[in-house]
Amino acid sequence: MSEELKLTILKKLDSEGSIEDTTAAFKDVSEDVVLGALKSLESQEKVTYVTLTTEFWTIEAEGKDQLENGSYEARIFEAVPVGSQGITIKDLEAKFGKVAKLGQGKCLANKWVKKDGASLVRVADSIVDQVKAGLETVHATGTHPSKDAIKDLKRRKLIKANKTISYAVSKGAQFSTELKKQATDLTMEMMQSGAWKSAEFKKFNFKSLGVNPNSGNLHPLMKVREEFRQVFFETGFEEMPTNNFVESSFWNFDALFVPQKHSARDLQDTFYLTDPTVANSLPDFWETVKDVHEKGGYGSIGYRYPWSEDEAKKLVLRTHTTAVSAHMLNKLAQGPYRPAKYFSIDRVYRNETVDATHLAEFHQVEGVIADKNMSLGSLISFLDIFFKKMGMTDLRFKPTYNPYTEPSMEIFSYHEGLGEWLELGNSGMFRPEMLRSLGLEEGVQVAGFGLSLERPTMFKYNISNIRELMGHGVDLGMVARNPACRLDKKMGKEALQRPEAVDEI
Amino acid sequence: MPTIDIDKKELFDYLGNQFDTASFRELCFEFGIELEEDSSEKGQLAEGKRAQLKIDIPANRYDLLCFEGVSHALGVFLRREDPPLYKVVPVAEPHRITVSPECAQVRPFVVGAVLRGVTLNAERYQSFIDLQDKLHHNLCKKRELVSIGTHDLDTVEGPFTYEAQRPEDIKFVPLNQTEEMDGHRVIEFYEEDQHIEKFLHIIRHSPVFPVVYDAKRRVMSLPPLINSEHSKISLDTRNIIIEITATDLTKVNMVLNILVTMFSKYCAEPFTVEPVEVVYPDGKKFVYPDLEQRTMSTTGKYLNGIIGIEKSNEEIAELLKKMSLEAKIQGDNINVKLPATRPDILQECDIAEDLAIAFGYNRIPRVQNNEATVSAPYPLNKLSDIVRREVALAGWTEALTFSLCSHDNNFAHLRRKDMGDEVVVLKNPKSSENQVCRTLLLPGLLKTVCENKRYALPIRVFEVSDVVLKNPAVERGAQNRRHACALYASNEARFEIVQGLLDEVMKSLNVISVVEANEGMRYCLEEADIPMYLPGRGANVMLIGEDGSSTELGTIGILHPEVLGNFDLKTPVSAFEINIEPFL
């Protein structure tokens, strides 16, 4: 059928040059069928067409009644006899039913009749039924020359607006009277039969989205972690074994020269354990650590307080991965001197009340460089390289305090977009009280630096609430939507907002 | 990090009116303190209020915790003034505090000093009070280690005694009160006081309370809680006696020295302090304060080396002056005099930091360190990445759940019993979500599905991460174990889907199912009665070594509908969770 219509259209165009109005040309074919044929022909560039819209009015059921029998008000007027006697409203209602009510209002408004007690009496001698005349015009022509008349009839729900759509068609660039079936896709059958050679392919809509692949996804925080690991591997770092969340206070604090009454060791800040409660043992150099706290040594006057072995044995969830760095440095010290670079990215714990920027567990990125030539200058130089790989240049450093590094530096980077200095992390040279008790020989300097993994991730992926990044509350759609992590490229707030992809995992 | 409030105009005047907020912020950055806020910025200053600067002070710089300290330190840093030289002036008969033997039971140490001829005004008085608050909060560990009492010397009479008495025997009117109280009443009374209440625990269970008396048996203070109304300081006070009691002798001296050095500025003869003698029960006598400068010896080689600069000893000495440190050169040695205000300097490295600040952190030349080292991933992390990629490539989405959870999540909700040999229990969690370290990844993933119900089924999530298990054989009594867990939630449980994923993971690790091979490293599923799975739909995942030995890796199954109900899930879920460490 539609193929037939298409051919008819093409033939008509061939003979007549154009079709001015499809409704006139194809009276028996409905408009949507015509449109389907035209669209198909247009996609083959055989025709072009423009849409013609005509408005017309049709008469509703109530309008038909009034067209035949006169308007309600005219009917009422006719029912009121000439003379002062008139007719009672009761009689009118008995005779006309609901028409009586509707009609008499208009009659009164038009001053055709007036009320006289319970009766209506004539005022006008004769009337013209404008409503009926209007309806007759609409009936005959489909419209009315007076806009007010249309408005009034429409308001009284006597007529209804209708539209006819038709099309003016002319020849397209590829006009011919021949029709070929268009292929929508390349199929195996076409390949086998060779039909693809003569096939005409339907025009493809490139302004569309593809079908979502049901792919798996890696978590954005883990993607950022991978980027960081890559940077560490590019700069000669060995990854530390950080798979021990439970740590003794000794390794977490004492070995790092954090005094036992330091506020970081308060129950308010650190998770302690009830089961198990204490470490089974302390490493063999614990007395060296005790001495350096109590009496000093290695040129230090120490903290001069009574150090408690019991306190050191208390188990905690590690508050930083520096506990592991201390282990590694202690191990490094067992062999002859060699320069070493260690890094880790893993979970650490703080007894925080969770809010938009704090979690009880988060990831710490840490790097440690042990070298006889290590200085603040070479640490700064390294940090320049490290952060440049993440697209952060223009670093500057602020003196700060940290119980186990001295000198210590906070790392800042200027962010063009935000117009402010962002704190990236912390760094410094480990104190000799710590290094020497761990067994490193004099002159071996160790620089360390650390930052949280979540902060740059939130920044790069434009996440403002840390709870949306880690934990079971994470939106899996967010995980699926996020782009690959390329720390050296502009991402998140820095880059343009991406449109939301399809909500499928 | 402590924060102090400083009057902006007063400080800017003191520094010679050369700063605006922005340039002062830069100065702070360079010096290692941080201008957090200027109350006149952003038009937030109320009418009639003077602009205040909120400054963050490093936690070890007790000498910068008040206007007097910060203004001097910055003045010296800017070379506008020389550091003051603090002196203890000898007096014929110093005031004496005699310590009674009972003090040893509760708070053994006391030190003291006298500030003579001070001139106070409202600002100085407030600064004096604020500094004591800051010291109490930080260095004194909320008064546990050290607590300060300051008194109008002209209202009391020496010699003084430091005693420990039964609470009922101590009677006095506490500061700003009118009621005479005994020790018990003091505890009861301050129970309602938000500020003092925090310190009650320090002595309330002791049979005796520490108390300082004057010669006429008038109570001067009940450390660490409250001073007496009688001896309180007013703006008219001219002579101040300070007594500081403590359980830590090192810190009490630090506190005394900070307090007297900062406020001796307002004495008739500035920067002088009169001594107080303390006599212990064994007859030993000590004179406080000890403002003697310590000398620490260092070398240009060390200082230059650690910073990465090349300065002569003379240049170093000149730079250290900016940090209020006086240095004398003696051959290769630089002998640095450390004022009583700088107890934070413990070792040469602390001098190195001061030198680096004086030189300017951001002027230190970049020197690339070219020592070659070899990179290497931690093998377990490398293994995890293999498994993670394999599972993600198979169409699973990675979750990252917390390693802490409630006890119920880990046990009751999974229909598991806590036999006490597995889970690490936290002592002081602030939330019930942090009661234990997880021993399985599964509860976190079930919660993840619960939070993501809005998505179309199926939901496929996985995690490769650590669980924590008790192990009495290791130093810390517990150790991590790397697990891989994946689950499939849909309208049907479809055991074979997670099973297929497990097959895929095993293949990637070069382990073959017993269905396909009968030698080499293999794995098999052994039907087992595992309460968290639907009966008949749970199995142990077993690894069979080349020698035929078998190790349990974990479990696989369709989760028991009760378990799903416990995690508020209405869809069937199948899952596996295995230990991947045997594949190392």
Image (cartoon, grey):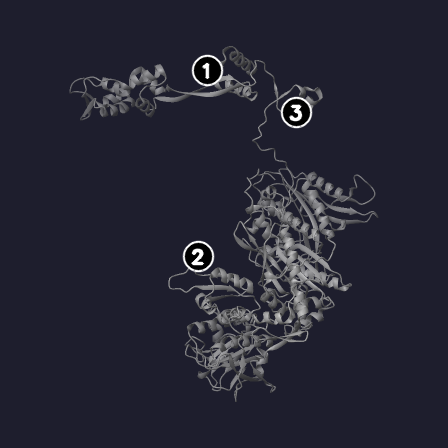
Amino acid at pointer 2: Lys
Amino acid at pointer 3: Leu
Q: Residue furthest left?
A: A84
Q: Residues within 10 Å of mark 1 (few under 14, many from 20)?
A: some
Residue on which the image places disc 1: A20
* Image-based side of B144 in relation to B419, left or right: left
Screen quadrant of the N terminus of chain B: bottom right
Residue on which the image places disc 3: A186
| Frontmost residue, B351 versus A272 | B351
Q: Contact, CB < 8 Å: mark 2 with mark 1?
A: no
| Helix, strand or loop under label 3 | loop
Alpha carbons under labels 2 and 1: distance apart: 70 Å
Label 2 lies in what chain? B
Amino acid at pointer 1: Glu
Label 1 lies in what chain? A
> Which dot, 1 or 3, sits closer to the camera?
1
Point out residue A22 in the picture as x, y percentages from the top left corner.
47, 16
Residue on which the image places disc 2: B42
Point out residue A148 in the picture as x, y percentages from the top left corner.
30, 23
Q: Is residue A56 visible?
A: yes
| Helix, strand or loop under label 1 | loop
Q: Residue furthest top?
A: A15
Q: Is residue A313 visible?
A: no
Identify the residue at image location x=43%, y=72%.
B123
